[in-house]
Image: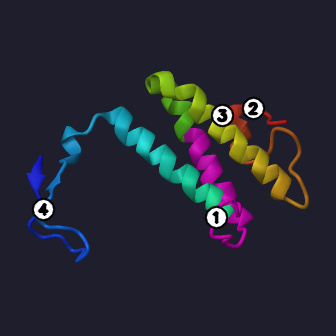
Amino acid sequence: MTENPHSADPGVDADLPVRDLADVPAVEVITKSIVMIMSSAAEKLGLAEDGAAVDLDEARRLITALAGLVTASLPDLGLHAAPIRDGLKSLQLAFREASSIPDAPGTGPGEKLTGPVH
């Protein structure tokens, strides 16, 4: 760990230790990335508590990118693989429900990578 003497965020204590990215295991970086993309997709689908506006175009991009990352990372996710796949499927189903003109089976966001979602 290193110290962050030049924090750009005035709300962050500059004396707190910051982990070097080189010290973070790859599976942790991948998992945190997946969670960030999932959260963003959920917000774009209007599933967040703040009731943000639905943006299906943005949600489609995020879910497709998420499907690619999840599919490529499955062998490395270990015990996290099943809940992550379930989360992805839930987002794909939420997208299908939010869309006024549903995609044909197998053509929804990320379905070319994960298979059709019903």
Report how far apart the C-alphas of labels 4 and 1 lie in the structure.
33 Å
Q: In this rendering, is residue 36 above or below 105?
A: below
The residue that mark 1 highlights is 49
Which mark sits nearer the N-terminus, 2 or 3?
Answer: 3
Dot 4 amino acid type: Asn
Q: Residue at x 68, y 43 (%)?
A: 110
Q: Residues within 10 Å of mark 1 (few under 14, many from 20)?
A: few
The Cα–Cα distance between marks 1 and 3, rounded to whole angstroms, is 21 Å
* Dot 4: element: loop
User: In this view, which residue lies farthest toward the front?
Assistant: 49
Mark 2 and mark 3: Cα distance apart in space: 13 Å
Q: Amino acid at mark 2?
A: Gly
Residue 15 relative to residue 48: left or right: left
Q: CA distance from mark 4 to mark 3?
A: 37 Å
**Disc number at residue 115?**
2
Give the distance between the C-alpha atoms of the residues marked 2 and 1, in whole angstroms: 29 Å
Q: Are marks 2 and 4 in contact (CB under 8 Å)?
A: no
Which residue lies under the disc numbered 3?
A: 86
* Mark positioned earlier in the residue sequence (1 or 3): 1
Q: CA distance from mark 2 to mark 4?
A: 44 Å
Quick check: is 67 in the magenta stretch?
Answer: yes
Q: Quadrant of the C terminus?
A: top right
Query: Who's the residue at 56% across and 54% down the image?
Result: 39
Q: Is residue 52 magenta?
A: yes
Which region of the structure is painted magenta? 45-68
Q: Position of residue 117 (x, y in %)?
A: 80, 36
Label 4 environment density (alpha carbons within 10 Å; few <14, some 14–19, many ≥20): some
Give whichever of 58, 78 is nearer the camera.
Answer: 78
